[in-house]
Image: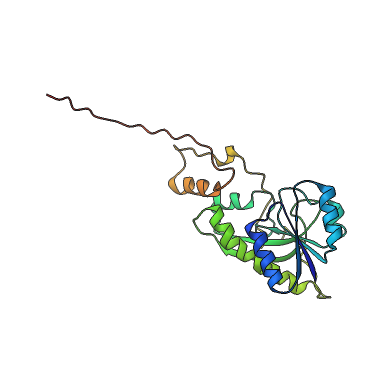
Amino acid sequence: MRILLISSAFSGLTQRYYTELEDAGFLVSVELHSGDIAQLIEGVSLFKPDLILCLFLTKYLPPEIYRNYKCLIVHPGIKGDRGPSSLDWAIQNGEPEWGVSLLEAAEEMDTGDIWAHKTFMMRQTTKSALFYRDVTQAAVECLWEALSYFNAPNFKPEVQDYSRPDYKGKLQPLIKQQDRAINWKIHKTDEILRRINAADGSPGLLDEIRFLFLMRIKKAV
């Protein structure tokens, strides 16, 4: 089976997927999506994959690809969650549980059918720590579950349905600096920590902290 990984960078999760699949005997290749659509389409066409897995995309996947190949996208969010800042919002809002969904690529972002879904309990830690441990492990579990269904004749992925009680996610916008801002007069310590943890890495949290130093000078007699 030929599996192509499409990612905007050869990230830690991309490397984990590559290693897992190669160790299992799959023929695996990686195509970086930097925004050059023609180059991306050419790379996909040359490899001729049976399945495309998209792991870390900062650019939209062109319809010329997902309409002609089976494409599954790793989304770090619970069922129904949509948007590019899923983990940021989850940490900042203090969600007790979060998850990873393996979604079929669709025209509208994060609306595709669900092939696999895993959840984990949230820890009070940075976004990087959550992503490289909890999110990555859940994503790997989703991978193997989806592959077990791939050639199953009776398998049908789950159509997203917000009327179901297990759909607790929603569309969230791209988180911006004004959303991350700390109000030192209103926000309590735990909320301040969540905002700092959610902004871990790039772009970070922009703030200004002033230290007032008081120095008492004892006059020599």
Q: Residue at x 43, y 46 (%)?
A: 189
**Residue furthest out toward the left:** 221
220 sits to left or right of 56 = left
- Front residue of 77/148: it is 148
Q: Which quarter shows the N terminus?
A: bottom right
- Front residue of 12/105: it is 12
- Front residue of 88/57: it is 57
Q: Is residue 28 above or below residue 179?
A: below
Q: Residue at x 77, y 73 (%)?
A: 149
Q: Quadrant of residue 167?
A: bottom right
Q: Residue at x 59, y 49 (%)?
A: 88
Q: Is residue 150 above or below residue 36?
A: below
Q: Position of residue 43 (x, y in %)?
A: 82, 56
Q: Position of residue 196 (x, y in %)?
A: 51, 46
Q: Quadrant of residue 70?
A: bottom right
Q: Position of residue 7 (x, y in %)?
A: 72, 55
Report the number of discs: 0
Q: Position of residue 84 (x, y in %)?
A: 68, 49
Whether residue 93 is visible, yes or no, is no
Whether residue 42 is visible, yes or no, is yes
Colouring: rainbow
Q: Quadrant of residue 68?
A: bottom right
Q: Which quarter shows the C terminus?
A: top left
- Front residue of 50/153: it is 50
Q: Residue at x 47, y 45 (%)?
A: 192
